[in-house]
Amino acid sequence: MEKTILEKHIFDLEQSLLQPEVRQSSEKIAELLSDDFCEFCSSGNIYLYNKGDIFDTDRNLSVIDWKIKDFSIRILANDVVLATYKAIKYNREQKKMVSSLRSSIWKCFDGNWKMVFHQGTPTE
């Protein structure tokens, strides 16, 4: 796959993981995360994925807006990609903005790209 097409595809996958309808659907999450997915969270915690997990169940996600800036990928192997970007999370209810630097490793399994690792680092 051509790099610009692959970059757009990975960007779209990253963006979908920020959508409330995906974050609150175990089926949609399972389509995007590998069974052995691991995240080094911006909170400092380590999250290990369990099939059936959903995210942000205790939050009103309709008041959260996400923006991805400076997105790029680096092809590490034919079936492995590193994505890096800045995520800006704005809570309209609390009028609060938080930014983080993000990196994700995506691997292609039988034609389907799945995230195997993610890290978020808080930033100004």
Image (spheres, grey):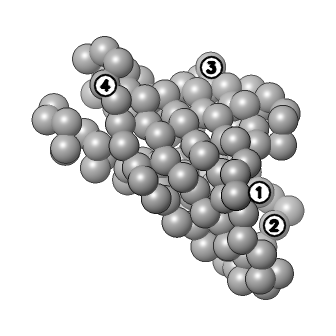
From the viewer's side, name the closer residue of 28 and 6: 6
Amino acid at circle 2: Arg
Residue 89 sits in quarter: bottom right
Disc 3 marks which residue?
Answer: 36
Answer with mark 3 or mark 4, whichever residue precedes in sequence.
3
Mark 4 — residue?
75
Mark 3, residues whose alpha carbon is within 10 Å: few (<14), some, or many (≥20)?
Answer: few
> Are dots 3 and 1 in contact, CB under 8 Å?
no
Q: Which residue is mark 1?
A: 56
Question: Mark 1 falls on what kind of element?
Answer: loop
What amino acid is at disc 1? Asp
Picture quadrant of residue 106? top left
Q: Which mark is residue 101?
A: none
Name the quadrant of the C terminus.
Answer: bottom right
Real-space Cα separation, disc 3 to disc 4, in angstroms: 21 Å
Circle 4 packing at 10 Å, graded few (<14), some (14-19), many (20+), is some
